[in-house]
Image: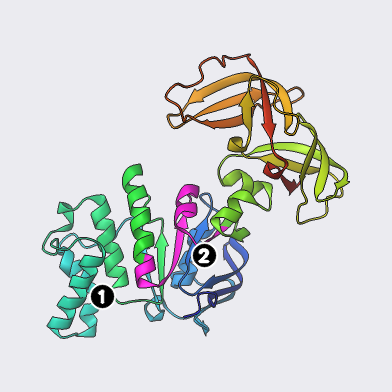
Amino acid sequence: MNKDESFIDIHGVHKRFGGVSAVDGVDLAVRRGEFFSLLGASGCGKTTLLRMIAGFETPTEGRILIDGQDMTVVPPNRRPTNMVFQSYAIFPHLSVRDNIAYGLRKDRLPKAELDRKVAEALEMIKLAGYGDRRSNELSGGQRQRVALARALIKRPKVLLLDEPLGALDKKLREKMQLELRQIQDEVGITFVFVTHDQEEALTMSCRVAVMSEGKVMQVATPRELYEAPNCRMVADFIGSMNFFMASPRGQDTDRLVLEAEGLGTIRAPLPGFAVNGRAIAAIRPEKLALTTEKPAENLASVQGKIATSAYLGDRSQFYVRLPGMATPVAVSAQNVERTVREDLDDGTPVWLSWRDEAIVVLPE
């Protein structure tokens, strides 16, 4: 199986509800065996796009192909897909075993084969021995695993997941993220996962499509999205980012020289586009160092004053006012020692420093 092979092809897909455009000209290629996530805020079109892949919605324009076959007008029950919903949608009157076997009943398998497949599914979701329990005897995480096993037992070519972990508490959600990725690795089926949670998408996905207002803004690996966003919307949605309006001042070998508000003259890696006018210089809070003494000469730096700070357990978040900037700059520092810096009161003069490589240049 070639994992670089395009498996789901979405060509020029639009979906309009009356005069409202929910999905606006999406082109996507999902690879065979990939864990692919659609990420975006509520109303961005990600669930509508997932429902069109499933066949629950029909595109207003465009085509959707799965494994080379045009699925645009194929009904849901004839597509090689299955879906897991946030609400679990398991049957409360059936046992765990009967819930998982539900999709196989129509295939009229011999009882021995049916029991074997259900036992394998229970083992896969780590619920061996739970077959006779009812859904009201299960935790939220266990019910979600049952829904997952029921969807996977018929081995669809594509599993579609619509915010399936959204109803779980934080710790259970984090545990299920790892388990879901492990299951996907084991079964080798293409997963298309919808979420509004950036951390969830980064943790689980091979690649992520970030959506906004019905459009795909960027498709990339989690690392590429975080380290090299292609626009302000993606940079702002994935994690935290500081933005500075900037104007180009020339080029120095492999660096772009800019004049940035609040930072002065800075150098940044050359972006993948021509900067002819105004641009945005962006830097993550954790890529800024905060000191009370002037940093070494080989580091770019600027002086400011502490506006406020917050202790967050594993890290502390500082907000620093810079001359000429209305919005304080966020700085994130890991609390690696038992004692946390408490000498940085509001108004304390501090220095911010950074390396050229930390700056990302974005189009205005």
* Disc marking residue 49: 2
User: Residue flagged by tag 2: what amino acid is it?
Assistant: Leu
As helix, strand or loop, the secondary structure at mark 2 comes to helix
Please tell me which residue is depicted at 39% across the width and 72% down the height of the picture.
188
Q: Tell me the magenta residue range.
A: 184-209
Please tell me which residue is depicted at 71% across the width and 25% down the height of the picture.
326
Residue count near mark 1 (Cα–Cα under 10 Å), binned few <14, some 14–19, many ≥20: some
Residue 175 lies, with reference to residue 214, above or below; the image says above
Residue sitting nearer the eye, 29 or 179 = 179
Q: How is the image coloured?
A: rainbow
Residue identifier under label 1: 103
Q: Hey, which quadrant is residue 17 in on the image?
A: bottom right
Residue 264 lies, with reference to residue 33, above or below; the image says above
Q: Is residue 193 magenta?
A: yes
Q: Residue furthest left?
A: 132
Residue 66 lies, with reference to residue 234, above or below; the image says below
User: Residue flagged by tag 1: what amino acid is it?
Assistant: Gly
Residue sitting nearer the eye, 348 or 199 = 348
Q: Residue furthest right?
A: 250
